[in-house]
Image (cartoon, rainbow, N blue to C red):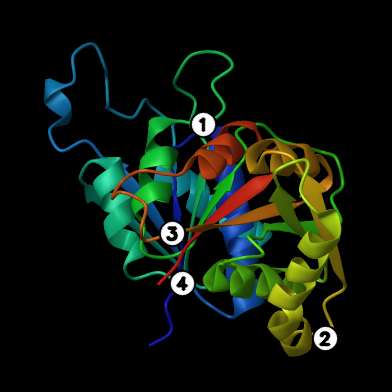
Amino acid sequence: MELPVTVGVDGSSASLRAADLAAEEALLRGRGLRVLHALPLMPHLLSGRDTRPRCGERSALAQVRHVLAVRHPELAVRAEEVHDVATAALVAAAEEAELLVLAARGDGGFPGLRVGATALHVAARAGCPVLVTPAAEDPVPRDHVLVAVNARCPAGAALDFAFDLARRHGLALRAVHAWPPGGPGRSERELLSTALAPWRAAYPDVPLTEDDEPGGAGQVLVEASVKARFLVLGRRRSTPVGRLGPVAHAALHHAGCAVAIVPES
């Protein structure tokens, strides 16, 4: 069964951009697009919030469907509203998706917030890769995919995803291995090259740059993400359920590009 690309929307401008990227991913993968909008279970109990649509105002789902129909008329789109908590709805949807896309945050939250609770919750629990798009629009052109590599224990699913993503988008791939300063740099480079050998052979058409950088992984990746279009990270199953590691946390909060969190089997 071919699984769709799924995107969560909430009516915010950021979620509209996420839907646009999700549509692009669906077309590149030859998949349909599922658009999901979670509604409050009991909206009448939400104090001080009027959930009724104003006269002439499109619902969040109708707005996204209209934008996608105009921009991607060739794409098969299935739009759904579900009455559930957004985090629960998205985690459940991930079980039936090839890729889940969502914005780092919606229009709520305090000024300066880079990533919201929903994105953090879903990225830590989803059973499929989660692509988290920046809250703010970025006009800077980006020319490559960045993937984090632990040369001593490479995350296979994340590398599969990163190489495939680069190939589909026609982008180069930069693989970065961060290591504690003061160590033998030459051996780190050799370890990285050996770790990447199977993927280099499997994807000969993907231009690959291998970088070993001394320093903390989170800082190295955040700094490297400034020129990347996507940053890809693995999520170990050994991490406590519902919790992201410090590197993923740093990337989601501070990376200068969309971040893909890929669960390992």
Task: Give the CA distance from mark 2 to mark 1.
Answer: 35 Å
Given residues 37 and 29, the one toward you in this image is 29
Q: Residue at x 44, y 22 (%)?
A: 108
Task: Give SS at disc 1.
Answer: loop
- The disc placed on residue 115 is 1
The type of residue carrying mark 2 is Pro
Q: Is residue 114 above or below residue 91?
A: above
Q: Which residue is mark 4?
A: 98
Task: Give the CA distance from mark 1 to mark 4.
Answer: 23 Å
Find residue 32 and report its horizontal and vertical position in percent. 49, 74
- The disc placed on residue 204 is 2
Q: Residue at x 71, y 49 (%)?
A: 178
* First in residue order: circle 1 vs circle 4: 4
Q: Which residue is mark 3?
A: 236
Q: Residue at x 87, y 47 (%)?
A: 141
Find residue 135 and report its horizontal and vertical position in percent. 60, 33
Task: Give SS at disc 4.
Answer: loop
* First in residue order: circle 2 vs circle 1: 1
Please state which of the two labelled residues, at mark 2 or mark 1, is closer to the viewer: 2
Q: Is residue 171 above or below residue 71?
A: below
Given residues 159 and 29, the one toward you in this image is 159
Q: Can you tell which quarter of the image residue 160 is in?
A: bottom right
